Image (spheres, helix red, strand yellow):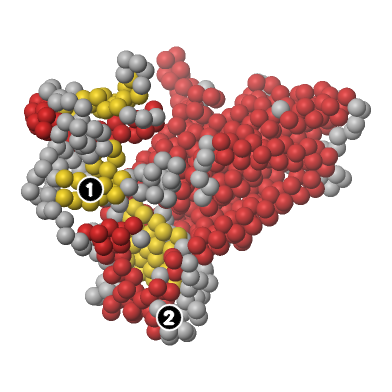
Amino acid sequence: QVNKMLKAIKGLVFPANMMLTWYVKPEKNQPDVLALVALKATTRDLTAPLSGDVIVDARQDYTQDGRVEISMRMNSEGARIWKRMTGANVGNEVAVVLDGYVYSDPTVQDEIPNGSTSITGNYTIEEAKDLANILQAGKLPAPAHIVQEEIVGPTLGKEAIRAGAVSFIIAFVLVLLYMQLYYSKAGQIANVALLTNLFFLFGILASLKAVLTLPGIAGIVITMGMAVDANVLIYERIREEVRRGQGARLAVKDGFRHALNAIIDGHVTAILTGIILYIFGTGPIQGFATTFVIGLLTSLFTAIFLPRLMMERLMDKNKTIAYGNKFTINAFTNIHIDFLGIRKILYVFSGCLIVISLISFATKGLNLGIDFTGGRSYVIRFDQPVVTSDVREALTKQLGGESPEVKTYGASNQVKVTTKYKIEESGAGVEQELAGKMYTALKGLFKDKSITLAAFNAKTGGHIGIMNSQKVGPTIAADIKNRAVMAVFFALLIIFTYIALRFKKWQYGLGGVISLFHDTCIVIGAYSLLDGVLPFPLEADQSFIAAILTIIGYSITDSVIIFDRIREYNRLYPKRDLLTNMDEGINHTIGRTVNTSGTVIVTLLAIFIFGGDVIRGFTFALLFGVVIGTYSSIFNATPIAYDLIMWQRRRAARKLATVKK
């Protein structure tokens, strides 16, 4: 309405040197009123006599009597023009204009001879800082271009929110039930800690005014599944102390003490991964990383302090705390698997999986999303089932032979169209043209043949038509791809460094990183191999990179906990050979591994089934990666570390033998 009014006013006859524009902010105490400003131009082409490139400095300052002001300095050329302008306009107003909007209109009090200017008025500190930033921004010679944008229609937005909320509630209830059934009374205590963790997490997000995206909800659910890991570690250690015959209080004390190192190491490696994800990610991926890291930090507090306080309070009242029922209390206690004895067979198995993955990646490649290729994508919903080939053929004719990619997106009446048509061009005109071409091409595929262009453009509130659109420029796509590679590289580097320093042996760090390479390679291979086979698209985009890094964080956490138990056994039983200590370390952490993986898989299954089409591919990567990560932490990371340590010992022995000769 404002723009229509401006066009109508411009249709009237005005002096040739007069132009109209709007004040950028509404009137004070009148939030619905904008001031229309008439500007008298001093040049024939109506351009500003002074541009921002003459400004040397602009900042918020104070006058001698303490009032807020904006101090501005100009270069010599600007000072000369400014002297002439201010001398000729004493008592008149001078407008500060950026992108066609007036930001301020101070009155000239006197001629300003040297370019050093003070702008005063009834400014607040925030308003003065904003104006100073505007004056500084005027120096920038390059215009701003939108290189990535996304529009989500209200229908798809509501569906995504509902699906995310449903998956969150179901996952949360399943985790609570799991802990209650497996750990009995102690499980109830863990559930209270989990509820408190959730309360803290949402409180921190609210205080930070964080925007909760669907990947952010997924981050909360995954964090919730991983948060119980600390409780599982503590309870498994308490069970061990009870089996040794210790009393209730001493068992709780030693259980918490022995589990503390593993909890801290596991959380630190996951948090480091989340930080890397936040640094190199953009948009929704940063939302995922934010909730992931905050959730891990709050779980450190709620899992370590709250359960112990509650247990000690119950024991003070002579209450008995059960750590399981007759079916679970002795689960995984009599396992004696020769994990290192079968390591070579599993090396071959893992090698075959990697080879298959590499062959698929080399021959079939990945279904790269527009995040990495650039282009426009549209989610289009019809009022009846459609065939993707019919949609592709109809669009190809309208787009001048440019064949878009068309895939079923969720239900059979919804497709995702990706095209590079006029991707180098931008503006509302191009978007309207493309929407019109798609409407012309696809209106015949609707059951209701009377559908209009406005109804087809469902982003305005309809239930069919274009539900979602996204655009990524080719330049930003290349940047996103480079940042994704850097994210994975730095995550592996930081994890290797942390583990090598923490366990004082580089072999543990290298074993963990090789295991992570194994996980990453196989998940990427699965995405390549199964795309087009599964009933939902497996698109490699920023969310996929987030999934890869989350898998890395989860898998290395599992490996670190096993390494921590091995380190403990090496300290307690220094005369036992390394192979025995490593096998015992894996066997005695199987209970924790199964329970933690179980809770994470339960939460991910809830997201996968109920979370909606938007994050189904993302959740599949996480689900598949957790399974592979659990396998590799047991069958790859520790055996590789063992072989590297033994190789170093044999090498040292050969050198010693050579010296003696």
Q: Name the residue: 39% across, 29% down.
A: 124
Label 2's element? Answer: loop
Q: Is residue 146 left or right of residue 496?
A: left
Quadrant hosting residue 257: top right
Mark 2: few/some/many CA within 10 Å (<14, 14-19, 20+): some
Q: Quadrant of the C terminus?
A: top left
Q: Amino acid at mark 1?
A: Ala
Residue 389 place in picture, x, y as percent: 39, 78
Q: Name the residue: 43% across, 85% down.
A: 449
Q: Name the residue: 7% across, 48% down.
A: 44
Q: Earlier in the sequence, mark 2 or mark 1?
A: 1
Mark 1: few/some/many CA within 10 Å (<14, 14-19, 20+): few
**Front residue (pair 416, 47):** 47
Q: Is residue 434 left or right of residue 494?
A: left
Label 1's element? Answer: strand
Q: Which residue is mark 2?
A: 451
Q: Which mark is residue 38?
A: 1
Q: Amino acid at mark 2?
A: Ile
